[in-house]
Amino acid sequence: MKYILSVLVAGIFFFSACQSGPAKTDKPTADTMKMAQDSTINIFEHMLVDNKKDPSCGMPVTAGINDTAHYKDKVLGFCSKECKDEFLKNPDVNIAAADLKK
């Protein structure tokens, strides 16, 4: 009886271990990186940048950040590459609209 019970427990353990599949990781893969580039997924979190608003269009960074730039030891978030390019044409004039965090 102990032998049958031991085989049954071992079988259940083996079966459940085989069904779990590969371990999931939080590391980005080439597929997820490509998906992020091709879609409208916001790539950056608003907590990682030093501005509250996009300096080019005034959009709040909490709505989504798709590009960033460094300016005078600050990391600025932009809603699009076009807004970033517009800012970089004349950053000294546009920085006031960024509403920098304190």
Image (spheres, helix red, strand yellow):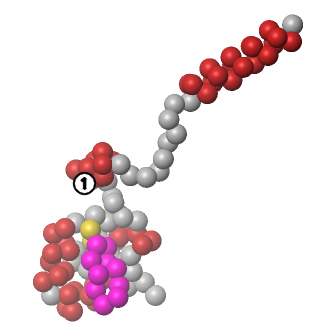
- 87 in relation to 78, above or below: below
Quarter location, residue 50: bottom left
The spot of residue 44 in percent (x, y) is 36, 64
Q: Which residues are magenta?
A: 68-77
Instruction: List x then y, in percent, for residue 30.
Output: 30, 48
Q: x, y (%) of residue 16?
A: 63, 24
43 is higher (above) or lower (below) than 3: below
What residue is shown at x 22% (from left), y 50% (from top)?
Answer: 38
The residue tagged 1 is 37
Main secondary structure along the magenta-highlighted residues: strand
Q: Is residue 14 above or below residue 96?
A: above
Q: Nearer the viewer, residue 34 or 51?
A: 34
Residue furthest out toward the left? 89
Name the spot of residue 79 as percent of width and height, x first.
26, 67
The foreground one among 63 and 50 is 50
Q: Quadrant of residue 17?
A: top right
Q: Residue at x 28, y 86 (%)?
A: 71
Looking at the figure, which quarter contains the N terminus? Answer: top right
- For badge 1, the amino acid type reads Gln
Check the image and report above or below for 20 versus 24. above
Q: Residue at x 43, y 52 (%)?
A: 27
Q: Is residue 58 visible?
A: no
Queried whether the magenta region covers residue 76, the answer comes back as yes
- Please tell me how crowded label 1 is: few (under 14), some (14-19), or many (20+) other residues with Cα within 10 Å: few
Q: Residue at x 30, y 45 (%)?
A: 31
Q: Please, which residue is most extreme toward the front here?
A: 3
> Farthest residue in the right direction?
1
Question: Left of 79 or right of it: where is 26?
Answer: right
Say what secondary structure mark 1 lies in.
Answer: helix
Q: Is 3 on the left or on the right of 32, as rendered?
A: right
